Amino acid sequence: SGNVKAVNDVSFNIRKGSIVGLVGESGSGKTTLGRCILRLIEPSSGNIHIEGANLLNFNNSKLRAMRKRIQIIFQDPFSSLNPRMRIEDIIAEGIKVHDKLISKNERLTRVAELMEEVGLQAEQMSRYPHEFSGGQRQRVGIARALAVNPEFIVADESVSALDVSVQAQILNLMLTLRDKHNLTILFIAHDLSVVEYLCDDLVVLYLGKIVESGTAKEVYSNPQHPYTRALLSAVPIPDPRANIDREILKGDIPSPLSPPPGCVFQTRCKFADAKCLEATPPTVNINKGHSAACLKLGELK
């Protein structure tokens, strides 16, 4: 067995108050990257800067204080809630940890406000998770993240386990909460139609490397990397008569245990040649804020 680089040489900025979409297939390193940013996984090297302070230099007490400002909404609304805890205790757990001076009555009032804010009824706070639907449980997860008034939230595929109609409700809720609380959100997803609706900026990850990034509008209207184009062509179009020339990717994402030489995408790229098998493509700025890492930039049709 060798060393696995689940995320390798990744660098990007998140503007305050923006929603950044982090997209890629399963196994591309999205969740690992999101958890590294929150130091739920300790990165082996690099820096994580939040308003100028490097999170990796924080000791346990400083990191504990920072936890109030950075939160996560987990992917699975079923396994991320303790089935033996009432909803009021699940949402209030962060408040108990970070606001020890608050009274029980104040805490319950805060829980009731949070439940109303995310579209649940305060009377439901004494129930257990199994009494809620998937969409309602995800709302509980959002309320739990908001309980400590964070500034930055990592939403880890927080709608992928939900029905499409419920997805739309949760996405609209996240937009409302972002505007109301001036939140900054890293939204991890593999569904690009969801990301287009929600996000200001977009980062495309493949096998632990960023292959394209830019404003969501720019990347959607002018995708440069073959992988981004393939992901976009997989987005369903609600017209059965539409004649779509889809770019189908061959094979599966390689194992990070033995990544391919040269360009990480060369094993699945129909444009790959001998040069792609040897050289690692540099990240090239296409225009302001839009960049991609491909040796064939400008040649692709």
Image (tube, helix red, strand yellow):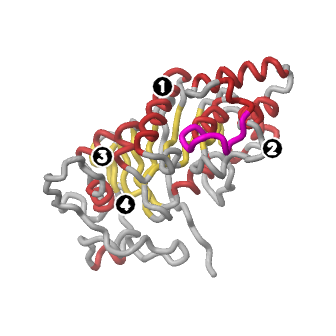
* Residue found 57% across the figure and 42% down from its top: 133
Give the residue number, with chain letter if any, for mark 3.
Answer: 219
* Circle 2: element type: helix
* Circle 1: element type: helix
For the C terminus, give its image quadrant. bottom left
Question: With respect to residue 140, does 161 lie above or below?
Answer: below
Magenta part mainly helix, strand or loop?
helix
Find the distance from the CA under tag 3 to the CA under tag 1. 24 Å
Q: Based on the picture, tell me whether residue 146 belongs to the magenta stretch.
A: no
* Residue found 64% across the figure and 45% down from its top: 38
Give the residue number, with chain letter if any, for mark 4.
Answer: 282
Find the distance from the CA under tag 4 to the CA under tag 2. 37 Å
Q: Are marks 2 and 3 in contact (CB under 8 Å)?
A: no
- The magenta stretch spans which residues? 127-137
Residue 85 locus on image (x, y percent): 77, 41
Residue type indicated by callout 3: Val
> Tag 1 or tag 3, which sits nearer the N-term?
1
Residue 238 locus on image (x, y percent): 24, 47
Q: Are marks 4 and 2 in contact (CB under 8 Å)?
A: no
Give the residue number, with chain letter if any, for mark 1.
Answer: 176
> Tag 2 or tag 4, which sits nearer the N-term?
2
Residue 131 locus on image (x, y percent): 66, 41
Q: Based on the picture, tell me whether residue 128 belongs to the magenta stretch.
A: yes
* Residue found 55% across the figure and 76% down from its top: 257
Give the residue number, with chain letter if any, for mark 2.
Answer: 60
